[in-house]
Image (cartoon, rainbow, N blue to C red):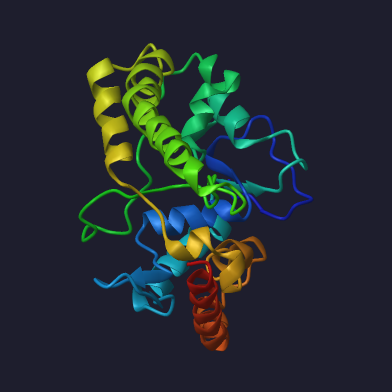
Amino acid sequence: MYLDLDEDEMVSGKDRLGFAVVRGQSALFAGVCAGMKFTERDSDGNYSIVVDREENFDIFSKLYTLYNDTEGVFTYNEGTTDYHAKKVFADGRSLFCNEYVLSTWDETLRNMTNEFAVIPRPKNNEDQKEYITVLQDSFLLYTIPSCISLDKVPVVTAMIEAQGIINNRDVIPAIFDTALKSKFRSDLVDYEQASRLIELVRSGITTDFGVVYDNSLNNIANLVGRLIMNRSNNYASEIAGNITLFQTSLEDLMMAFEQLR
């Protein structure tokens, strides 16, 4: 059965899917995991715009076909349907669930009766050597106010460093080794197998400067999700029309960083 992906179409309770996924940003993360790059850093630490690389166009084409022209794929807008990815997956009606790793904490998946496992995102092709896991596009930043007296700086920085050490020693192992590999895995999946898959996911963790600073770079990364969500298969022309703006935005951002020194 082919699913028309228009928003006014509903998925029947009898439908069996390849996967259901919320429209927009999911395609961006799938692209980065397949090798999409928006910026690149040289040995001197300088960033450049590489969004117009040929590999990006190839990956976008595959993503567009997967999300918009593939039988058994259902895309939806958040809040407009009851057939969300986790629910459809938990009901045993989809083969894959494209979600954050933290979704394993969700009761919807924890209460599943079917066996399941966390696996890495698909590679672009056989030439991609390693699996890639992309981080979310925003991060918490810890800063020291400029009004703090200089004699307190050593104490404050020592506290921040200690927090980092404790997180690395206690929190991260608790998440990966205790929670993901044991507590939140399906009881029907072998522990050793689940552990190897989690390590594959963890070993490929990365991000792209263009994803993190997307808003400051004229939406260089989220353009992927927006075009696919709007069913606009003109990624190459969008990049060609905005490449100068992307480069100018990067120069302005680097200048702003310099002013903070």
Q: Tell me what residue is drawn at x 44 percent, y 75 percent.
A: 51
Quadrant for the N terminus in the image: top right
Residue 208 sits in quarter = bottom left
How far across and how far down the image is residue 26, in percent? 54, 51
Image side of residue 240 versus residue 56, left or right: right
Q: Is residue 191 visible?
A: yes
How far across and how far down the image is residue 197, in percent? 29, 32
Residue 175 sits in quarter = top left
Instruction: Please tell me whether residue 81 is drawn above or below residue 146 in the rendered image.
Output: above
Q: Nearer the viewer, residue 104 or 236?
A: 104
Q: Nearer the viewer, residue 205 or 59?
A: 205
Instruction: Please tell me whether residue 85 is drawn above or below residue 54 in the rendered image.
Output: above
How far across and how far down the image is residue 97, in percent? 50, 36
How far across and how far down the image is residue 114, in percent? 46, 18
Q: Total of numbered circles in the picture?
A: 0
Q: Tell me what residue is drawn at x 20 percent, y 55 percent.
A: 129
Q: Tell me what residue is drawn at x 24 percent, y 71 percent.
A: 43
Image side of residue 208 versus residue 74, left or right: left
Q: Nearer the viewer, residue 8 or 234?
A: 234
